[in-house]
Structures are given as C-alpha cells and as structure tokens.
Image (tube, helix red, strand yellow):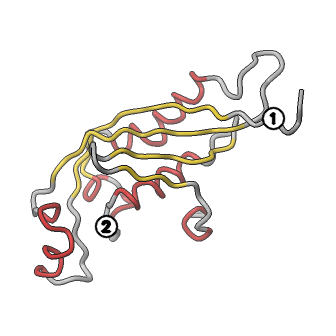
C-alpha cells in the first residue's frame, strides 16, 4: 500500500441543545448589543449537525480506517450523552464560566474526540443553523491539551 495515501472517514451525528450567549464580563446592555436575541435569559435551542473527519491507515484485514460501530459508541459517550437535550450553560461543566458559542462548542467537542484510539481526528464541523456552520481542526495548543 502507498504510504502517501491519505483517506479520511467522515461521519455525521445530530443533537439538540439549548444555550444562552451571555458573558459575565459584559454589562447587560453590552451582552444584548453583542449577542442580540441569543442573549435571551431563558436561552434558545438548536438542532446541531456534527460532522467528524478521521484519518488513518487502512487495516489490511478489514479494509477500514476505523470500525464505525466503535466510532459511533465513542461519539455517543464523549459527546451525545453529554450534550443532547441539555442546556450547555447549565448542564455541561465545560461551559460554566465560558460562553457556549458554537466556536467554543467546536473546540470542546474536538478536545473530547481527539482521544479516539483507532484513528486521527482531522477536524470537526458543526452546523448550528442553515446559515451558520463552524469548523475546527485543532492547533490551538492550550485548548487542545485540556
């Protein structure tokens, strides 16, 4: 097999979660100016689409980078069980004291998934709405190492 060959495995997952975009470092007026209706004190929800991309050597016996059942179980444990039908502000410890923007959500999910033992996490992409999507490929050393 050609050692320069690079194949990526992409997989898509869905979860629903709510959040309130609000920074304790800003006044109420500044929070409203910066976050607008997303600063609603009661929060608001999204039906997120999470796309993950992994790369790795193709196993000569199975012909796969990673077993999809193993990947699905890992994503279920690391992300979906923690985030699906939750308030990111109130139910996810990583967002206590951090604004749960989708940018921050990308970095947190990347951190959780980079430990998948059977392949290398290349990037994640989260679609928040039909108009907004965010992609993260690591590289922010202090966030990736936490």
Residue 52 vs residue 7: left or right? left
Residue located beneath label 2 in the image: 99
Marking on residue 106: none
- Give the residue pinned by disc 1: 5
Q: Secondary structure at mark 1?
A: loop
Q: Is residue 27 above or below residue 21?
A: below
Foreground of the two, 24 or 101:
101
Q: Which marked residue is nearer to the observer: mark 1 or mark 2?
A: 1
Q: In the rendering, at what x and y percent does residue 124 appear?
A: 51, 46
Up-down: is 121 above or below 21? above
Using residue 92 as the reference point, say whether residue 5 is left or right of it.
right
In three-dimensional space, the C-alpha distance between marks 1 and 2, rounded to whole angstroms, equals: 40 Å
Q: Quadrant of the N terminus?
A: top right
Could you tell me which residue is drawn at 75 percent across and 37 percent down? Answer: 6
Q: Residue at x 10, y 57 (%)?
A: 42
Q: Secondary structure at mark 2?
A: loop
At 39% from the left edge and 37% from the top edge, which residue is drawn? 81
Instruction: Estimate how packed mark 2 is, as few (under 14), some (14 to 19) or many (20 or more) residues with alpha carbons within 10 Å.
Output: some
Quadrant of residue 127 within the rendered picture: top left
Task: Say whether disc 1 or disc 2 marks the residue closer to the N-terminus.
Answer: 1
Q: Residue furthest front?
A: 131
The residue lying furthest to the top in this view is 61
Give the position of the C terminus as an image quadrant: bottom right
* x then y, percent, for residue 17: 26, 45
Give me the residue at 88% from left, 36% from top: 3
CB of mark 1 within 8 Å of CB of mark 2? no
Q: Nearer the viewer, residue 78 or 22?
A: 22
Q: Residues within 10 Å of mark 1 (few under 14, many from 20)?
A: few
Please indicate whether residue 117 sits to the left or right of residue 108 in the image.
right
């Amino acid at each position: 097999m050609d050692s320069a060959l690079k194949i990526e495995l992409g997989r898509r997952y869905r979860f629903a979660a709510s959040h309130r975009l609000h920074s304790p470092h800003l006044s109420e007026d500044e929070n409203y100016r910066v976050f607008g209706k997303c600063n609603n004190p009661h929060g608001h929800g999204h039906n997120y689409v999470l796309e993950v991309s992994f790369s790795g050597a193709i196993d000569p016996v199975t012909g796969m980078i990673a077993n999809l059942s193993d990947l699905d179980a890992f994503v279920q444990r690391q992300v979906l069980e923690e985030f699906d039908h939750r308030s990111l502000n109130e139910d996810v410890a990583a967002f206590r004291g951090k604004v749960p923007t989708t940018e921050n959500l990308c970095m947190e999910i990347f951190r959780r998934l980079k430990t998948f033992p059977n392949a290398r996490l290349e990037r994640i992409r989260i679609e928040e709405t039909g108009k907004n999507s965010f992609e993260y490929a690591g590289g922010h050393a202090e966030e990736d190492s936490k």
